[in-house]
Image: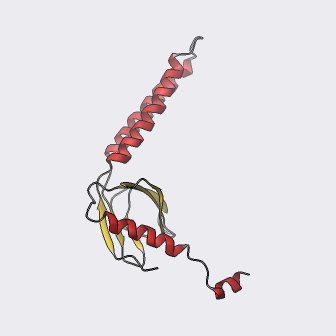
Amino acid sequence: MQAASAVQVTVQRFGVWNTALGLVSATALSAVATWLVTRHDELPGWSGVLLMASVLVGVLGAVDLLRRWPIRLLWDTQRWQVTDPGLGTGSIDVCELRVVLDLGGWMLLKFRCDAPRRTLRRGWIPVQRRGLESHWHALRCAVYAHAAASVRPPTPDRQAQLG
């Protein structure tokens, strides 16, 4: 298999991801509210606390959706580097980057880092085609070529060591 060429992209648009998370949060909040409101017996005192906690979690989730930093993905034909998705600073050498969900124009990537001093060892990167049109094909090739190379079947010498 031919190695994928080097690619560098900066993911700055998270519209699809934010919409999906917003819908999940709104659905969960409405389910709790509906359950509390449609109870036929008298509501216990803790139900108000549960409803308020649900609203607080929903508001905090909405604030988190608005606070996203650009993520730089760099494939140098040997390894992946990403900026810290939580802080938007510092590069992380990634030992594994794989596609968890691929919807054609949108991918959810999962990365893993083995560096012992890193507080962030794994994470998720939502990537959408919008904003990356000119690099989209190269990015997909790099992600899939790297994944295929990491699951290569063992050579006969390696099989003899394992067996």
Q: Residue furthest bottom?
A: 157
Name the residue at 42% across, 32% down: 26
15, 138: nearer the viewer? 138
Residue 99 visible? The answer is yes
Residue 94 visible? The answer is no
Image vertical order of residue 146 relative to residue 159, above or below: above
Image vertical order of residue 63 relative to residue 76, above or below: above
x and y percentages locating residue 67 in the rendered image: 32, 47
Count the labels in the image: 0
Colour pattern of the rendering: secondary structure
Left or right of residue 159: residue 143: left
x and y percentages locating residue 52 in the rendered image: 46, 26
Quadrant (top left, top right, bottom left, bottom right) of the C terminus: bottom right
Q: Quadrant of residue 19?
A: top left
Name the residue at 26% across, 56% down: 131
x and y percentages locating residue 154 in the rendered image: 61, 80
Image vertical order of residue 81 relative to residue 120, above or below: below
Name the residue at 31% across, 54% down: 69
x and y percentages locating residue 149 in the rendered image: 50, 75
Name the residue at 65% across, 88% down: 157
